[in-house]
Image (cartoon, rainbow, N blue to C red):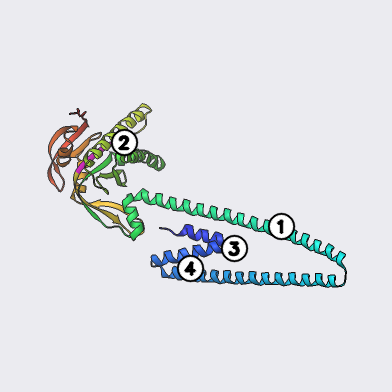
């Protein structure tokens, strides 16, 4: 995770001479860099921490000296008052004493006001700084959760790495836009990106509603999987329901585009269920991904589908056949995988209670 928010807070503390807060920031940065094995920066902030401690120590000594000087001045004034008393100038002494008392009261009031103002400003600064740090922390957390599953992100934060995991059974979904290359030639780059972004935002919301994990997008291809990173038994149905909702969204969008004479995308969807390995790859730009023959077969289910259709493998069909109306397609030759039995998912069945 980035330590830039803490470094920015340190610079802000330096600008306003907030030494105590700066001491805590330097100490935290030194420890953080040490844990990250960045010993150069760890030594740098440890050195800065030592300087701050020295400055605070000298400042404390200066305060003690000022306090002693103040006490000495008071004693000196008291001596002057006693001399006046010895010279039988009692009346003048009383007047002088009252002046000193009033003067001290005024000074004490000013000092209290200054101290109160300083404490209030420091309190506001600390609150503002903590709020900035907390906001940046939440922003970093949200960015991390946008690219990694929550469990994987937590493991990565705690250990610095995330172990790959094997899953015996997950359901993988692929979508692809028919004629994307040809259609993209008729749209400006901003319009093309806007159109894809609009569709993918809707797909993302659908995945969240059905508890399906978005894996990645590759151009106009969208990939998601159910049953990971937290295994469950409902993933075949979850993914199939999500696919039906995607199809319905695209059907509605196509009708709207046709009515106003605008170009539109037609979508193909493919689903397969099988074992995969999942994990995080990369060191700078983390990416959560899945691998295995099941991924390749799911991709082939999509490429062998038809516009506006959801094509599933026999493995997925056996798990959902009691809950969805499906149309058999027979065995179809699949590149690199021989012949595969496929089905089109039509709609969900209404299950009567027993």
- Based on the displayed image, in which of its 4 quarters is residue 351 positioned? top left
> Mark 4 and 2 residues: CB-CB less than 8 Å, in contact?
no
Q: Nearer the viewer, residue 335 or 9?
A: 9
Q: Nearer the viewer, residue 244 or 80?
A: 80
Residue neighbourhood size for the residue with mark 2, other residues' Cα within 10 Å, grouped as few (<14), some (14–19), many (≥20): many
> Mark 1 and 2 residues: CB-CB less than 8 Å, in contact?
no
Q: Position of residue 12 (x, y in %)?
A: 55, 59
Q: Nearer the viewer, residue 240 or 108?
A: 108
Quarter the C terminus occupies: top left
For label 1, the residue is: 109
- The reply to whether the magenta stretch includes residue 266 is yes
Q: CA distance from mark 1 to mark 2?
A: 76 Å
Q: CA distance from mark 2 to mark 3?
A: 59 Å
Q: Mark 1 or 3, which is nearer the eye?
A: 1
Q: CA distance from mark 1 to mark 4?
A: 40 Å
- Mark toward the start of the polypeptide (4 vs 2): 4
For label 2, the residue is: 265
Query: Is residue 42 visible to the viewer in this orientation of the structure?
Result: yes
**Residue span colored magenta:** 264-272
Per the rendering, the mark at residue 45 is 4
- Mark toward the start of the polypeptide (2 vs 3): 3
Label 2 SS: loop
Q: CA distance from mark 4 to mark 2?
A: 55 Å
């Amino acid at each position: 995770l980035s330590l830039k928010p803490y470094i920015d807070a340190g610079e802000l503390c330096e600008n306003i001479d907030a030494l105590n807060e700066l001491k805590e920031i330097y100490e935290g940065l030194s420890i953080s860099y040490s844990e990250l094995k960045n010993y150069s920066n760890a030594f740098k902030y440890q050195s800065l921490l030592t300087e701050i401690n020295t400055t605070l120590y000298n400042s404390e000594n200066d305060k003690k000296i000022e306090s002693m000087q103040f006490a000495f001045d008071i004693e000196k004034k008291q001596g002057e008052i006693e001399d006046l008393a010895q010279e039988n100038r009692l009346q003048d002494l009383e007047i002088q004493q009252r002046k000193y008392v009033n003067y001290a009261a005024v000074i004490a009031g000013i000092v209290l006001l200054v101290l109160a103002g300083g404490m209030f400003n420091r309190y506001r600064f600390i609150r503002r700084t903590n709020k900035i740090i907390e906001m940046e922390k939440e922003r970093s957390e949200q960015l991390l959760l946008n690219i990694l599953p929550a469990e994987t992100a937590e493991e990565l934060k705690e250990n610095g790495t995330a172990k790959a995991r094997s899953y015996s059974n997950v359901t993988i979904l692929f979508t692809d836009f028919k004629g994307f290359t040809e259609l993209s030639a008729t749209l400006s780059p901003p319009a093309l990106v806007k159109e894809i972004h609009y569709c993918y935002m809707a797909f993302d919301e659908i995945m969240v509603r059905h508890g399906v994990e978005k894996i990645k997008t590759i151009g106009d291809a969208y990939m998601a999987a159910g049953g990971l990173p937290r295994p469950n038994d409902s993933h075949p149905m979850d993914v199939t329901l999500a696919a039906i909702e995607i199809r319905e969204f695209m059907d509605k969008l196509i009708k709207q585009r046709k009515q106003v004479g605008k170009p539109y995308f037609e979508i193909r969807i493919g689903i397969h269920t099988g074992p995969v390995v999942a994990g995080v790859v990369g060191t700078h730009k983390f990416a959560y991904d899945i691998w295995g023959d099941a991924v390749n077969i799911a991709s082939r289910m999509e490429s062998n589908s038809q516009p506006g259709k959801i094509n599933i493998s026999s493995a997925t069909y056996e798990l959902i056949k009691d809950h969805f109306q499906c149309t058999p397609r027979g065995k179809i030759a699949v590149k690199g995988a021989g012949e595969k039995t496929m089905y089109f998912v039509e709609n969900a069945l209404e299950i009567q209670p027993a």
